[in-house]
Amino acid sequence: MAGVHKQSFSVAAERVRVFAQQGFHVANVVANRYLGRPPRYLPILLLFMTYRCNLRCKMCGVCERELEAEGNPELTTEEWKAVLRSAANLKTMIASISGGEPLLRADIYELIRYARDLGMAVHICSNGLLLNSENVRRLRESGVNTVSISVESPDQAIHEQLRGPGSFTRAVEGIRRLRAEAPEVRVGINYVITTVNFRNMAAMVPFAESLGVHQLKVAPIHTNLLHKRKRIEQYANLIFGEEEVAELGREVRELMQAARRSPIQTTSSMFLSGVSNLYQAPRHFRCYAGYAACAIHPSGMMVPCCDMEAAVSVRDVPLDVLWRSREFQELRRQVHTCSRSCWDTTNAELSLRLRPSSLLGEIAETWRDIGFYF
């Protein structure tokens, strides 16, 4: 029992340390967003290490990007390490690794360990299909902090309608294996809301509890961001029409009620309350893309937001130099005038969190959010 209390104390102490260390960095980011200047720090780095994937999900446009990437090779191990060293110079707190399926990169465990040794918390997003015992062991040994697995329904048929035959059982088995064989790794579920699965959103909460995960992140389907390369006719039936928005709102409210009763950390209520607006009158907000976070694509292209394109690359100029460059500041100015419909759990929810009213009024929820990643 004493060991449990000691571990809980050490976790709390780590969160206090992170809050104290990052408080000034966040203040610098917020101030420079208002002033329209490059911040000194880069709190969150999104690393899309590959577009390759072992699934062909109906709502995902990454596979189309994989075809574009032919002839434009992924960054090598050493090039990614150089990116991580530059991120350390910018005091990056969280390195979030995604794809495609990042576990398809043979060097992924080496890169996770490298980022950890540089002092970053590492989060990885996966479809879970490659989480056999060997890969779970390697993830654990790499020091990864958190792993999020995509699950689109507690109902196997609905999940596989979106992600393909056999994907549900393997994803769920991957989650259970992580919890059993790497208990210190925190595990989350990512869930994309579509017309196919939105009627069992609230049921995802007890389902996630039954799997022993720590977090459930929910986001509405988009036609832009990483999905913009996909032809709309291939997934138009997954997008909410005017006739479905009222029901979507009711289902979201049921999810929020279920989340309030659960110990599992979920997407914030301020984010969830705006989900249905995406398909009617999208909310606009002061976006922190390019200030609190930026994204690097597999070939090295660096952008404030994954919905943007750019000619700047970490292959040509180090990340920490680009971060403060005139070229990247011009991309930030495009963020200031952006009118795209967006409500994602990266930049939208992060931007809501960084509003002064949220920073002052939702400290407990922010504490829980940050705690998931450390």
Image (cartoon, grey):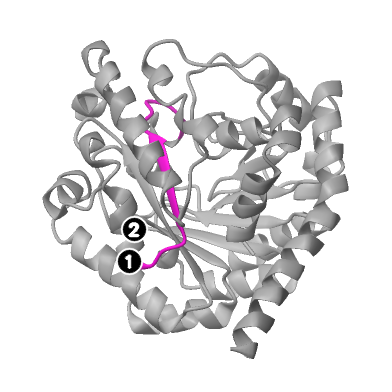
Which three-letter amino acid code belongs to the residue tagged 2? Ala
The residue under the point 21% across, 29% down is 234
- Secondary structure under tag 2 reads helix
Taking depth in this image into account, of 33 and 72 the one nearest to the observer is: 33
Q: Residue 366, percent across and down?
A: 65, 46
Q: Quadrant of the C terminus?
A: bottom right
Whether the residues at callouts 1 and 2 have beta carbons within 8 Å, the answer is: yes
Tell me if residue 217 is in the magenta stretch.
yes
Q: Label 1: how many residues lie within 10 Å, few (<14), some (14-19) or many (20+)? A: some
The magenta segment:
212-225
Note whether 330 is above or below 14 in the view shown.
above
Separation (CA) of disc 1 from disc 2: 5 Å
Residue 208's disc is 2
When the figure is inspected, residue 266 is found, relative to residue 39, above or below; the finding is below
- What is the quadrant of the N terminus in the image? bottom right
In the rendered image, residue 91, in percent from the top left (x then y), is placed at 81, 55
Residue beneath label 1, please? 211
